[in-house]
Every structure is written in structure tokens, then in C-alpha cells.
Image (cartoon, rainbow, N blue to C red):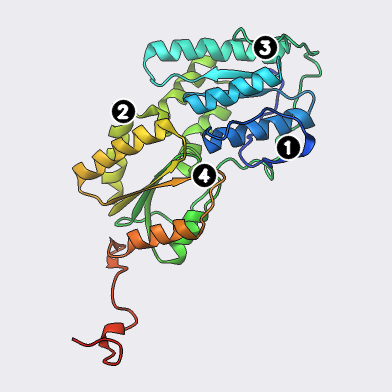
Amino acid sequence: MQRAGYQYRRLVARAADLPQAYGTGPSIPPTICPYAGYIARAAAAALHEEPDARVVVAWGCDGMRRAGDLLSATYPGRAVCLQVPRGSDDDSVRAFTGSLERLEAWLASGNGSPFGTGAGASADPADAHAPAPDDSLSPGFFDLPAPQEPNGLFVVAGPLSSDALFVFLAERGVPVSGVESCTGPARREALAPLTDPALDSERQARLLLETIFCPHRSRPDRRALLEQRLRRSEAAAILYLRQSFCDPGAYDSLMVAGLAGDIGLPLLELETGFPFELDGPLRTRIEAFLEGQALGGRTTAGDTDDLFLDPDLFEL
């Protein structure tokens, strides 16, 4: 994108209600993945606010494909879908390299679509520049509030919009042994080399396909990576946060459940929305799961209030 004269902006943290306030934007089906729906609304807001902006929807699952189709139909010539292969073999890298090169050429020309869709709206390449990135609007990733420790909770999740869960755990003295999320610290570190402007399209494609943080990559290589991370982290339990209406997440959580059984780790799977909200029911489920788990070398269970030692309240 930068080689074509654009500055990139992540859409994760944009206000999702702007298209409704403007009375514009695509109609989002209620059964779409909440993350895909959020991205579609945020992209519509960006396209409404910035006439020279372009949106690229990278998809490897049905939810994001639907979001991309909605946007490309509503904003022909300004929004396109970029299919991301599930594998990282040589054939997948070659195909994805070709897609990235067509995408770059489209961004440079501003004409039509690189993938055969859209109405062909044109723009002057000299003017086809989105505003500079505004990190206050679009951080895209979260950091952990405390260092990772052994004998703690390992969190596997789809996109998380904040570190609220990890602040919640830190406040309760629950250590975190690892995080596997497409918006987590490890993902940011893995994508850092992509900022090198000298990187060619083939190397970009290979780096992107070799980072297997997305649940749609629920293949043997993802299972092997998770098993390696779980064993190295010396985690004591697993928490899986799955986006509602996410089919890849359902398959992925089933794989993680099997892995947890093979390793012998307790597992809790919960369904969440996007943006992530740590509401009362979710807190209760997590706290109930943590009761009795030996995390950080101690157990959170116990008669801490000495209720059963009070003869007026309990008798044998």
C-alpha cells in the first residue's frame, strides 16, 4: 500500500455507529460474525469520511468474505476483497504473491478492481492518498499488563479489541502463561518485518501466510504450533474465547479441546462478541472456572471466609 502512495490505517478501533448516523453504508446481516460486521461498519465510515480512501478486506473465512462483498457492492471501485489462502505451501505463496501485486497495481491506478469486481470508478493516482495513520483511532493490537508466567492461564482467542480480560486476571492475581490471538503481542512481533519498504511481494506473501494466528488456519501446522507454545509456556489451564457466528472458530475450538485433552489441561470455552466486553455473566463464568485451578502455584479455591467453621451457620 505504501509503495502505491497510500498510508494504511487499521479499522479495529473506529466508531462502529458512524454509518448509521450518516444514513449510509451497507446493511449488515444480524447473523454475521461480530468482528466482520464491525469491520464492515468501520470501513463504511472511513469511506464516507475520506473520499480518496480505499478499503481492502483480507478474508480467509466466510464472515470476512461477506463483509468484503457488502463493501465492494456498496462502494464499487473503492473496496475490494483479498483472499488469503489457508496454507503456506509454495503454491499458496505464489497465488498470494500474484494477488498482492495486482492489489498494488490497482491502488496505484485507482481504477476498477484488481480482482474483476466493482464498477470501475477511477481516481487520479496523484490524489489517491488516504490520510496519515492516526494511532489514537486505530491501535489494532493490545499489550499484556503483566509479564507471562508459567503455571498460569493460556488464552486462545480470535480478535480482541482490548486488554480488558488480562487486566481482570491480573487484578485477581491469576498469571497468564501465553496468548494466541490475531491482535495479541506475538502477532504484532511476527508482522514487524512487513514494515520494511524493501520487502518484495513474494516475501510479504510468505511472511503473512506463515503467521498462523487466525482460527481459519485450523490445520495440522496450527495444532503443532499451539501444542509447542502450550508445552513451552508450562500453562496450567486453557481459556478459549470464540466469536459468535464464527465457523472457523468452532472448528478451531474443537481442535484446541482435543489438544487440551491430549496434554491433560482443563479447558473453558466461551462465546464473545466484538468489541470485547467483559460483562457480568462472562466474569462469573471465568471466575467459576478459575475456582479450584492451581494457577501460579496456588489454588483460588478454599473456605476463605471460614463460613463452615461458624457453628451458628453450619452444623454437622
Picture layout, residue 149 above or below residue 109: below
Callout 2 amino acid? Asp
The numbered dot on residue 33 is: none
Q: Which of pointers 2 and 1 lies earlier in the amino acid sequence?
A: 1
User: Disc 3, disc 4: CB below 8 Å?
Assistant: no
Residue under pointer 4: 273
Question: Mark 3 falls on what kind of element?
Answer: loop
User: Disc 4, disc 1: CB below 8 Å?
Assistant: no
User: Disc 1, disc 3: CB below 8 Å?
Assistant: no
The numbered dot on residue 20 is: 1
Q: CA distance from mark 1 to mark 3?
A: 23 Å
Residue under pointer 2: 221
Residue under pointer 3: 118
User: Where is residue 119 drawn, in percent x and y?
Assistant: 71, 10
> Which residue is pictured at 39% across the width and 58% down the height?
286
- Which residue occupies the foreground of this view, 64 or 220? 64
Q: Which of pointers 4 and 1 lies earlier in the amino acid sequence?
A: 1
Callout 1 amino acid? Gln
Callout 4 amino acid? Gly
- Mark 3, other Cα within 10 Å: few <14 / some 14–19 / many ≥20: many
- Which residue occupies the foreground of this view, 66 or 1? 66
Callout 3 amino acid? Gly
> Which residue is pictured at 53% across the width and 22% down the height?
65
Question: Mark 1 falls on what kind of element?
Answer: helix
